[in-house]
Image (spheres, rainbow, N blue to C red):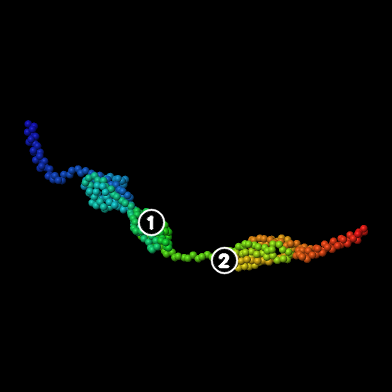
Amino acid sequence: MKSKLISVILPLAVVLGMVLVPAVPLANVALANPDYNLTVDITGNGNVTANGTLLTGYPNTTSYPDNEVVTINATADANYHFVDWTGDTGTIDDPNAANTTINMTGNYSIVANFAIDTYNLTTNSTDGGNVTVPGEGTYSYDYGTVVNLVATPDDGYYFVNWTGNTGTIADPNAATTTITMNDNYSITANFGWLPVVEKKKVVEPAAFSASYLHVSPPQVSPNQAVEVSVNVANSGGQSGSRAVILYVNGKAEQSQTVSVAPGSSQNVVFTVTRATPGTYNVLVEGQSGQFAVRSTSVFGGGGLGTGGIIAIIVVLLALIVGIIFVMRGAPGGA
């Protein structure tokens, strides 16, 4: 009975429902959509925003509804630049653009890559030398790199200075210096010709010396002349004059001025006499010697000589005769 009742009521309920409930298209029936995770990381120096929100704490993971188009923006720090997006880039509109979009149809992990800026240094030189460090040409360096510079002149030339973009050169006037790469630079090492200057020969002045002091004769009678001679030489490069002084017993006795050519010598002669017997010391230009004056004899200042001998004989004979005469005249004599 129940089964018959149900079989009658159920079709009626279905018909009633179809009449009372408006028809709804099946396509308009929404199913529950899943969320997907977008994980963002970076290399280098920079940051990323997603739909205008700055992402922090890399790697950063944020959930988005299925099929949402997320706007991603990569911004490099100062002196860095954006390179590209890597990772799950299949739904990124342009992986090489810093500002682009990604369609969230799954869980994705992407990386924003940043790199430090690079700049070119172009070096060259004028005639007379070369840039030996880093060389001549164009070289690339990261921002802030301190580059050594060495300019080497050729023989007969000298370094003048650096010209061009010299704002970050430590010393533009030094052949060995540095440049800091904050931009693209072009610099030139300048060289100058070094004229040959003949060295003037230095002529040495006159230089005097004395040698070979000679005293003749070394022994004389009072007032007899004595010659004192000395050799004065000039070893310098120029002719010159010299006052040569004779000292006798420490006192200046005579002076002669002589002129001597370079590389030559001259003999200087003094004549001196002394009446008083004794020994006399002479000094000329550091050279020393001496002479002696003999005492005067009772027989004459010239010694005995022939006359002196005869006089002695006569005196002796007279003395003998006187003695004989005295002896004969004495008492008891013969």
Quadrant where the image shows the C terminus:
bottom right
Relative placement, left or right, of 23 versus 112 is: left
Q: Residue at x 60, y 68 (%)?
A: 259
Q: Give the quadrant of residue 11.
A: top left
Residue 246, how many percent across, how many down? Answer: 66, 64
> Which residue appears farthest toward the top when viewing the image?
1
The dot on residue 53 is none
Check whether the beta carbons of the residues at disc 1 and disc 2 lie within 8 A of each other: no
- Position of residue 46 in the picture relative to residue 29 (left or right): right
Please name whichever residue, 287 or 183, is drawn nearer the observer in this view of the structure.
287
The residue most toward the right is: 331
Viewer-proximal residue, 120 or 85?
120
Q: Tell me the SS state at disc 2.
A: loop
From the top left corner, tell me how far across and down residue 322 is, in percent: 86, 62
**Toward the viewer: 290 or 69?**
290
Determine the image quadrant of residue 226: bottom right
The amino acid on which the numbered mark 2 sits, given as a three-letter code, is: Pro
Q: Residue at x 25, y 51 (%)?
A: 95
Q: Amino acid at mark 1?
A: Val
Tell me the residue at 17%/44% (across/down): 30
Which quadrant holds residue 156? bottom left
Q: In the picture provided, is 248 more to the left or to the right than 309? A: left
Instruction: Locate the N terminus by quadrant.
Output: top left
Question: Residue 235 location in percent, x, y?
Answer: 57, 63
- CA neighbours of label 2 inside 10 A, class few (<14), some (14 to 19), many (20+): some
Tell me the element at label 1.
strand
Name the residue tied to disc 1: 133
Q: State the image coordinates of residue 247 (x, y, percent, origin top left).
A: 67, 63
User: In this figure, which residue is indicated by the disc labeled 2?
Assistant: 262
- Cα gap from disc 1 to disc 2, whole angstroms: 55 Å
| Label 1, residues with CA under 10 Å away: few <14, some 14-19, many ≥20 | some
